[in-house]
Image (cartoon, helix red, strand yellow):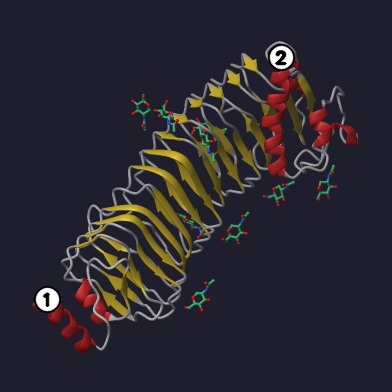
Amino acid sequence: MYSKELFAVAALGFASGAAAVGCKDDPVVIRNQQDADQVAKCSTIPHDLVLDTSAGPAIDLGSTLTEIQGSLQVNNNGLIQTLSCESLKTIGNTFQLHNLTSLTSLMFTGLEEVGSIDWITLSKLPEPTFGEPGITKAQSIMVSDTFIENLNGLNVQNVADMNINNNHRLTLFSTSIKTLSNVLLVNDNGLNLTMEMPNLEWIANMTIANVSSFSVPSLKTVNGSMRFDSNYFTDFLAANLTTIQDGDLSFVSNPDLLNISIPLLEKVGGGFTIANNTALGKVNGFGSLKDVGGAILMRGSFDDIELNALTDVVGTAQFISTEDISTSCKKLQSLSGNVVQGTVTTCRGNDAGANNGTSSDDSGSGSGSGGNGEGAASLASASMTTVVTLATLGGLVAAFL
Ligand SMILES: *[C@@H]1O[C@H](CO)[C@@H](O)[C@H](O)[C@H]1NC(C)=O
Ligand SMILES: *[C@@H]1O[C@H](CO)[C@@H](O)[C@H](O)[C@H]1NC(C)=O
Ligand SMILES: *[C@@H]1O[C@H](CO)[C@@H](O)[C@H](O)[C@H]1NC(C)=O
Ligand SMILES: *[C@@H]1O[C@H](CO)[C@@H](O)[C@H](O)[C@H]1NC(C)=O
Ligand SMILES: *[C@@H]1O[C@H](CO)[C@@H](O)[C@H](O)[C@H]1NC(C)=O
Ligand SMILES: *[C@@H]1O[C@H](CO)[C@@H](O)[C@H](O)[C@H]1NC(C)=O
Ligand SMILES: *[C@@H]1O[C@H](CO)[C@@H](O)[C@H](O)[C@H]1NC(C)=O
Ligand SMILES: *[C@@H]1O[C@H](CO)[C@@H](O)[C@H](O)[C@H]1NC(C)=O
Ligand SMILES: *[C@@H]1O[C@H](CO)[C@@H](O)[C@H](O)[C@H]1NC(C)=O
């Protein structure tokens, strides 16, 4: 015998001219607003909710649905313009939006927890609308190739991974994260991107490129590496940072950088690289730096290098500048073989190729002071990225000697 319910569902199916959609479908597939109206009556969806490529232009999931235990997926849909649900609080797995080229409005004012955010190619979405407090829990966040101007409403405190890239309109990325346990990658966003992480206390690794302003006032520990390539900030200050535990610290090709200051930094576990920051006149913001676990590589246009607290560098050290650094070199050379275990292979000023990253001691440019190590020779044709890696390797090689 047919149950009343089944009959009702079948009737609904006929009424909407489509197969009935049930809360427990695996996955629940929405092809149009009629389907969405049925789904909007579910309070929980135990599996995935998927919007078909033909759903749109407006899909509203109503005000009853509070939880999707699987993922919410909308992919490859050029039709959908607005997507909303005011009641949804939790997405257990991924909130995935891929290749939605007409989406202009995304409103999830009740959303607080997601497993992860995975948004790629949202070419018209200026800003997602979340409520208060917004999304406070997410394991990982990927926002790539969107029209998004700011990421307000992402108020996550602890996250494992965050990758923000190719969002050409993004000019403000201000995040409340306190800890980040794997990797933060930021690159190729808006040309005038301000990045603020006022609450960040520790971060495992970060690689930041193409950012115009950067602030981490509370940062104390970097567990892995911290790299800054091709940014446009003039000042870099990490006032509370004391330790870079296991990885590298590097500043490469940041053309506007005038001042780097990490006054409390005592330890860099890996290599320490400063190269091709052509506006940087002095390296004097590392007054507490004692230990470097890898090599030190400094190439630039500075006339002063102060590393007065150094007590142990496991790898080699190389200093090359376009300016006269003879005063600094006197002090630095005296560290060779004692403080700098791998020896100071080069300390040389007045070298026009200092910022090229291709000038090796072998090339004979400048007033070479000899004693170049094999690291320098292999730098001859290295790209800047390789240079950074070599600084770490230099440290490792020296450590095994
Ligand atoms: C993006 O979605 C459109 C439909 O809107 C589709 O034609 C296109 O193949 C998709 N692109 C990719 C890279 O999947
Ligand atoms: C990073 O270092 C902080 C401070 O020492 C520590 O509390 C945290 O657990 C470390 N995180 C990782 C991922 O190692
Ligand atoms: C910075 O980003 C802009 C726009 O995304 C891009 O045109 C430019 O090439 C990037 N610059 C660097 C040095 O990465
Ligand atoms: C970049 O942003 C700052 C403030 O955020 C503003 O003062 C400056 O004019 C902007 N520069 C450009 C080129 O848009
Ligand atoms: C810097 O560290 C000190 C000591 O741990 C702490 O009291 C202070 O609040 C920190 N500053 C910021 C801006 O977080
Ligand atoms: C990030 O840093 C941790 C140390 O906390 C390290 O073990 C891990 O391999 C790093 N991950 C990447 C991708 O660099
Ligand atoms: C040095 O930095 C400038 C400006 O950012 C860049 O154009 C150039 O390619 C860099 N040189 C190397 C060798 O990376
Ligand atoms: C560099 O910045 C630090 C911290 O803001 C500041 O104390 C120092 O005076 C600055 N140095 C120069 C040369 O401007
Ligand atoms: C540095 O690079 C510039 C531009 O590529 C080049 O003109 C110059 O000759 C190079 N200098 C040295 C010393 O290699």
Give the mark nearest the N terminus, 1 or 2.
Answer: 1
Q: The C terminus appears in which quarter of the rendering?
A: top right
Q: Quadrant of residue 64?
A: bottom left
Residue lying furthest left in this view? 4
Q: The N terminus appears in which quarter of the rendering?
A: bottom left
Residue 349 visible, this angle: no
Which residue is nearer to you in this view: 351 or 119?
119
- For residue 174, side relative to residue 12 (left or right): right
Q: Residue at x 39, y 74 (%)?
A: 103
Q: Quadrant of residue 314?
A: top right
Residue lying furthest top in this view? 338
Question: To which residue does mark 1 refer?
Answer: 5
Q: Is mark 1 within 8 Å of ligand 1?
A: no
- Could you tell me which secondary element the residue under label 2 belongs to? loop
Q: Amino acid at mark 2?
A: Leu
- For residue 309, side relative to residue 104 (left or right): right
Label 1, label 2: how far apart the Cα atoms are: 84 Å
Question: To which residue does mark 2 refer?
Answer: 335
Q: Residue at x 17, y 79 (%)?
A: 9
x, y (%) of residue 317? 72, 24
Q: Amino acid at mark 1?
A: Glu
- Could you tell me which secondary element the residue under label 1 belongs to? helix
Which residue is nearer to you in this view: 26 or 339?
26
Residue 91 visible, this angle: yes
